[in-house]
Image (cartoon, rainbow, N blue to C red):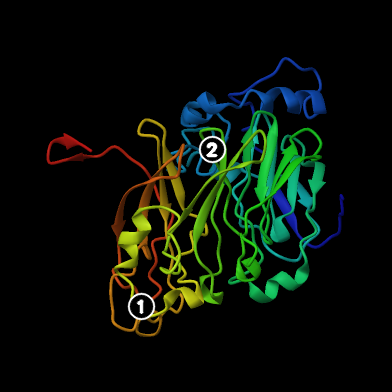
Amino acid sequence: MIRISNLIRFAGLSVALLSAGVKADIAVKGSPEHIRAVTGAIDDAMLESAGEQGRDWLTYGRSYEEQRHSPLTQINKGNLDKLGLAWTIDLGTKRGIQSTPLVVDGIMFMSGPWSVVYAIDARKGELLWTFDPEVDRSRAMVNCCGVVNRGVALYKGSVFVATLDGSVYSLDAADGSVNWEAEAFEANGTYYSSTGAIRLFDGKVLIGNGGAEFHARGYVSAFDAQTGELVWRFYTVPGNPAFPFEHPDLAEAAKTWTGEWWKRGGGGTAWDSMVYDPDLGLVYIGVGNGTHWDRNIRSPEGGDNLYLSSIVAVDVKTGAYRWHYQTTPGDTWDYTATQPLTLADLEIEGKTR
């Protein structure tokens, strides 16, 4: 599966930043035994405290709050002019990389175009293994905005990735072999795509979908990280009201739509933005645009069209709806609510919120 050419390179800095918060007493760094030890230690408790894990970057956004702040000070304005190139690595693609790498004890895991996963020894720029899910290149025709992948997840010795064509893989972090594979798209998922970073919350891997430009209906799926079994699925817009709604809140949401929106899917894809508050047990989902963009077409008599362009909170264990805030009622401008979400405790009018 490993393929190297001279097309694109991933560069490392010469400043030594890779002594990690997660360590293993293994002599050979980068060996399968070392990788299994350091990634095997990543559990729910460690991910919940990821922001305190020293030099490691264990989850997308660095912590569940996804503030993306690094406390490291070794690189600063006093030595910035002394940085130099330490290594480059060829990833065998003409396309760019949009993923956020995860790093544990000097081992880097990242994804690239066509959902390819790479494991790299970041101390010396050595490619340890590559996993290529061999996505059918024709999927690019029904994919908005590039065949990118924004990131992987780590948990108990496994690397997780959601592929462009809707597969979810659990890989052995030591060698990239497949532990299990699950299907995130429904049977009629021809127009779906998956380009977002997969998330790992409460022992579950979560992924949404893209495709609102191509007559898709948005939802988020949660799979058991150990077995790959589907635990819950939350739909972001109501389906055909002639059939029972998948969860009770959709009956209320359907009252904000008119016409026959379900024939085009309705849209509302949650293609990347998700954050998790373990104290409250809530996942916050950023929901995208409608299908069609123009509300006059998708919902001719108006309406807010829930939960388009909304931040929706759901229970991490069951996927049950808890609350929502719609940023653009009846969105007809593709404003969406899929911008990166961040959690923070702020003092407002003398009270912590």
Identify whether 115 is placed above or below 212.
Answer: above
Instruction: Check residue 143 in the rendering and tell me which mark sits there, or answer none.
Output: none
* Sooner in the amino-acid sequence: mark 2 or mark 1: 2
Q: Position of residue 348 (x, y in %)?
A: 17, 42
Q: Nearer the viewer, residue 83 or 325?
A: 325
Q: Position of residue 33 (x, y in %)?
A: 80, 23
Identify whether 2 is placed above or below 309.
Answer: above
Going 87% across and 50% down the picture, which residue do you hit? 1
For the question of whether residue 202 can be seen, the reply is yes
Secondary structure, mark 2, is: loop
Q: Which residue is mark 2?
A: 75
The reply, left or right, for residue 281 in relation to residue 30 is left
The reply, left or right, for residue 84 in relation to residue 300 is right
Q: Nearer the viewer, residue 333 or 318?
A: 318
Q: Amino acid at mark 1?
A: Thr
* Occupied quadrant, residue 328: bottom left
Going 28% across and 74% down the picture, which residue do you hit? 303
Other-residue count near label 2 (Cα within 10 Å), few / some / many at <14 / 14–19 / ≥20? some
Q: Amino acid at mark 2?
A: Ile
Q: Which residue is mark 1?
A: 332
Q: Position of residue 49 (x, y in %)?
A: 47, 27
Which callout, 2 or 1, points to the residue nearer the camera? 1
Other-residue count near label 1 (Cα within 10 Å), few / some / many at <14 / 14–19 / ≥20? some
Identify whether 194 is placed above or below 127.
Answer: below
- Give the quarter of the figure containing the C terminus: top left
* Occupied quadrant, residue 42: top right
Secondary structure, mark 1, is: loop
Q: Are marks 2 and 1 in contact (CB under 8 Å)?
A: no
Going 41% across and 73% down the picture, which residue do you hit? 334
For the question of whether residue 13 can be seen, the reply is no
